[in-house]
Image: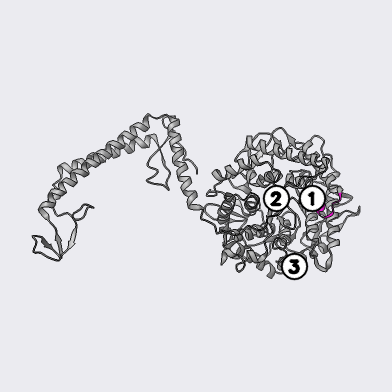
Amino acid sequence: MTTPALLPLSGRRLPPLSLGASAFPHHRATLRLSEKFILLLILSAFITLCFGAFFFLPDSSKHKRFDLGLEDVLIPHVDTSKGGKNLGGFLIHGQGHDEHRHREEEERLRNKIRADHEKALEEAKEKLKKSRDEIQAEIQTEKNKVVQELKKKDSKPLPPVPLPNLIGISSGEPADPDIREKRNKVKEMMKHAWDNYRQYGWGHNELKPIARKGHSTNIFGNSQMGATIVDALDTLYIMGLHDEFREGQEWIDKNLDFSVNSEVSVFEVNIRFIGGLLAAYYLSGQEVFKIKAVQLAGKLLPAFNTPTGIPWAMVNLKSGVGRNWGWASAGSSILAEFGTLHMEFVHLSYLTGDPVYYNKVMHIRKLLQKMDRPNGLYPNYLNPRTGRWGQHHTSVGGLGDSFYEYLLKAWLMSDKTDTEARKMYDDAIEAIEKHLIRKSNGGLTFIGEWKNGHLERKMGHLTCFAGGMFALGADGSRDDKAGHYLQLGAEIAHTCHESYDRTTLKLGPEAFKFDGGVEAVAVRQNEKYYILRPEVIETYWYMWRFTHDPKYRQWGWEATQAIDKYCRVSGGFSGVKDVYSSSPTYDDVQQSFFLAETLKYLYLLFSNDDLLPLDNWVFNTEAHPLPVLHLANTTLSGNPAYR
Ligand code: DMJ
């Protein structure tokens, strides 16, 4: 809730006063001091007028009175023989006796008005004697009451659903002391990132670790939604940082409010907030996370009100008005955004018993299935009004990436029963391999970008997640090409490691080329930054889980050391602007995904596989683990909550 601005009164700002909040529970319960005085004056004048009216106007009791809430009532006429008078079918009952009672009643009323008036004056005088702090404390109490009321209204009870089989919420402590030490180092880095955010950015979306204050970007709208808290929760839990987890839970319980006039990214809010809250719920069992996730999801639904059902990129959480990014081709929605909702939305339907979420994402899938795809590739842009593709750009990095990831993960999350999703994934990957994946002259496998019939030989840091995706999808692949896809994953991991190894800081650039003699190196100045991204480490972790080749732990340790050396500052961790410079400058942002993903994947890399086994958990694109749900449990007929 926002506090109305205090207008200057004679150059000073006076504290607001609380007035009758309980009488107007949905209105602001505060008024300025000057307004209060004016109100009191008007009230006194009005009451004096009422008194005058009583004494100087003709005695109304001499006229026939109809019900004023007093005891004499109009009784339907049945008998005139008892001294009553018939008035158009009604009888005025016991008139002489009643006139006396009327006068008594009026006297009682007058006394009551007098007493109320005096009481109100006394209360107002008392208020005026109070200090600014006392008045503010009272206002705060009133506000809290209103917030609590609203909260109660918002939190409808959810149907009880059986928790899925939650296996592997364990410590995963490695026996090898060297690996244990590395894991402890990662945990210490998490604590450094969290403690500084706690101290300097608490409640803000992200932290500026050098300026030591809160930070935000337009993806979170203009509200302080504590993105870092929500994104970090499950990492804290997995690492056993339980005090910190509880602090986060308390903040969420008391402060995370979605009734804000703020325009947010549907995709980012889904993967970071809904994904983060759902993972925190499944790991800890704390209902508050589930309730918040469902409240938030309800606020995203208006984004789907488009002619095609393809959601807008952004939605105003209060008004429900949606729109697309101004930079997107021809007013299009983005494939990686509207195509990265499935996992979270299926879980929402499962937990609420409400098919609305499931239906929204299945509608998107059906629509995509029907569309023609140039060369079998999905373009990054789709117009939500016309249902037509925008520019024919295809990418496994930014704008496309997690759409492919969620096709595979929809299948995995359904306990491999959602074969439709698996087929779409297999078809898409075949087209990608044919048109986008190449080997450089130096023998590095890379994934380029398709732009209007031409392959751009450039790969983004974001694209490096695909190594892990290929490995994850190897089992169950068409024509038993498991070995092939595991190998492809290993080749992408190698290329991305090269992109780190060929820099001065041993940290990877945002994008790197394979052109004109350049291999895995950024050429443009504005592509040389590293903003604490996770994708390369994510791929190391998946490759480690599937192969146990020690080189992946080694590469992960190199990255850990480089981050600690070059991105760590006393106020947290910062991105760097040029990974090829020996004296890099900082971008002064500690991204929330650093705590959600980068540090989580590093921690898992140095943990045993029994911590969150991949047969039972599927990580969303922001590294929030969600349990496997058999398809029958998530669709209308199968989920007991729907019956
Ligand atoms: C994360 O928010 C997610 O991984 C998303 O899918 C894309 N990239 C960022 C981190 O780089």
Residue 303 occupies quadrant: bottom right
Residue 472 occupies quadrant: bottom right
Instruction: Identify which residue, 326 or 48, lies in the foreground.
Output: 48
Residue 307 occupies quadrant: bottom right
Task: Specify the segment rendered in magenta.
Answer: 541-549
Q: Categorize mark 3 by other alpha carbons within 10 Å: few (<14), some (14-19), many (20+).
A: some
What sort of colour scheme is used for the picture?
one colour
User: Where is mark 2, residue-wise?
Assistant: 169
For disc 2, does the CB lie below 8 Å from ligand 1? no
Give the position of the C terminus as an image quadrant: bottom right
Q: Would you place residue 17 above or below residue 154 in this image?
A: above
Q: Which of marks 2 and 1 is in front?
A: 2
Q: Which mark is residue 298?
A: none
Q: Would you place residue 375 above or below residue 351 in this image?
A: below
Instruction: Identify which residue, 635 or 496, lies in the foreground.
Output: 635
Q: Which of marks 3 and 1 is in front?
A: 1
User: Where is mark 3, residue-wise?
Assistant: 423
Whether residues under marks 3 and 1 lie with C-beta atoms below 8 angstroms apart, the answer is: no
